[in-house]
Image (tube, rainbow, N blue to C red):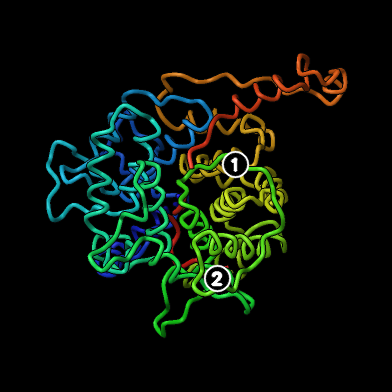
Amino acid sequence: MTVRRSAAALAATATVLCAAAAPAAVAAPSPSPSPSAALPSGLYGTTDPTYDGVWRQSLAFVSQRAVGVTPAAKAVDWLIGQQCDSGAFPAYRPDSSVPCDGKTMIDTNATAAAVQALHEVGGHPDLVATGVDWLKSVQNEDGGWGYTAGGASDANSTSIVIGALARAGEKLGDVTTDGGKTPYDALLAFAIPCGGKDGGAFAYQPDKAGKLVANGDATAAGVLGSLGKGLVVGNNAAVKDPSCHKDTPLKPEQAAQNGAHYLAGALAKTGHLDQPPMPGAEDSAPQPDFGNTADAVVALSASGHKDKAAASVDWLAKNSAGWAEQSGPAAYAQLVMAAHATGADVHDFGGADLVAQLNATGPAPAAVKKPTASATKDEEKKDSGDGDGIGGVWWFAGIGLAVGAGAGFLISGRRKNQQL
């Protein structure tokens, strides 16, 4: 799960979000806070957290835990303090001493991300449980979730909630509506059938005419959701090339493979996904979408096709530094998740130590697992292969442990109405 959120974009569309329950975009630069508004000391990032505070904090936590970093206690306490008595989380609440009320802008994406973050941090099962209970209480009749409670279901929100429920130990087949609809019933309704040029992709929602239009971020989220995966996935071995299944009805695993088929084809062109120009922008040329590309990499690895993401990992390693520096903790987290999911070196990603960069955006972590030095090709050749020396079984086991164990995203809850 965005399972990847643009505070600037959300600020510009806040009224629309309230009325139409639109989704949030991820890991784009957010406006700077006013000089008079001091940021909490436990918060990650230095930009205005109004629209993405909980989101970026949660992504930071899940990616840190995947690579052996334990967040600072005050950072965890800040996230805990954001939770409402109902179990829901808002995007950000500046004064946690003031109880949530009808004006508090709670949402499913922030809640699902925070549930995953607290689960990965550990030690707060009651808070995870209340978050899960709230998510289940706002399930739509079609089995899915919208960005806000009661809003029309969308692929991104449904996927990141699926990931949160799965990571919390819920049996998704038992999370049903009164009419017997499961989360998968809703998610697969956004899957575009095979056959056309966009076959296999997921739409965010049907358009005004009821047509499903391919959406790169919704597809990445849909793949993870269909597999019952959370925001972080492990380094999976590559299997045969993805293909598009035409079975009716589709099984969730088949829908995931269809989505992987679409993403592999989309990435094969340039190594990255594109985002459409902003309305009114002078430059109408598509621009590279770093966040969605990172999400696509995670989705491909989760579905057993990390080999199809190799060129995209290289592209991110060479080109994402400026984007991540400008965008902040959520962007660094997405890159950590992409590198982790494909076995890339999170401590030397295009020359950058992604873990150190992410850690630097928040309070000093409580603990950091030191990376294990990688063997050179010459050193690997010296090993006899019996597992005792460099390049042997135990050496590579140590490397694997240094990378960390991933936990089964989204959204980047991630991005709204962004098409290839």
Please report the residue visible at 81 percent of the width from the left and 24 percent of the height from the top: 376
Q: Position of residue 205 (x, y in %)?
A: 41, 71
Check the picture and name the quadrant holding the C terminus.
Answer: bottom right
Front residue of 280/217: it is 217
Residue 277 appears in the rendering: no
Residue 398, image quadrant: top right
Q: Position of residue 9 (x, y in %)?
A: 40, 59
Residue 38, image quadrant: top left
The residue that mark 2 highlights is: 282
Q: Position of residue 392 (x, y in %)?
A: 76, 21
The residue that mark 1 highlights is: 341
Residue 184 appears in the rendering: yes
Q: Is residue 179 above or below residue 49?
A: below
Please report the residue visible at 50 percent of the width from the left and 66 percent of the height from the top: 418
Tell me if mark 2 has few (under 14), some (14-19) or many (20+) residues whose alpha carbon lies within 10 angstroms of its own. few
Front residue of 216/19: it is 216
Q: How far, Cα to Cα, is label 1 from label 2? A: 37 Å
**Amino acid type of the residue that numbered disc 2 sits on in the rendered structure:** Glu
Q: Earlier in the sequence, mark 1 or mark 2?
A: 2
**Amino acid type of the residue that numbered disc 1 sits on in the rendered structure:** Ala
Q: Position of residue 106 (x, y in %)?
A: 24, 52
Q: Left or right? Give the position of 392 relative to 248.
A: right
Seen as rendered, the residue at the extreme top is: 388
Q: Say which element carries label 2.
A: loop
Q: Left or right? Give the position of 393 relative to 203.
A: right
Please report the residue visible at 59 percent of the width from the left and 52 percent of the height from the top: 303
Q: Left or right? Give the position of 170 relative to 201.
A: left
Q: Which mark is residue 301?
A: none
Please report the residue visible at 71 percent of the width from the left and 20 percent of the height from the top: 395
Front residue of 202/238: it is 238
Q: Is residue 321 above or below residue 276?
A: above
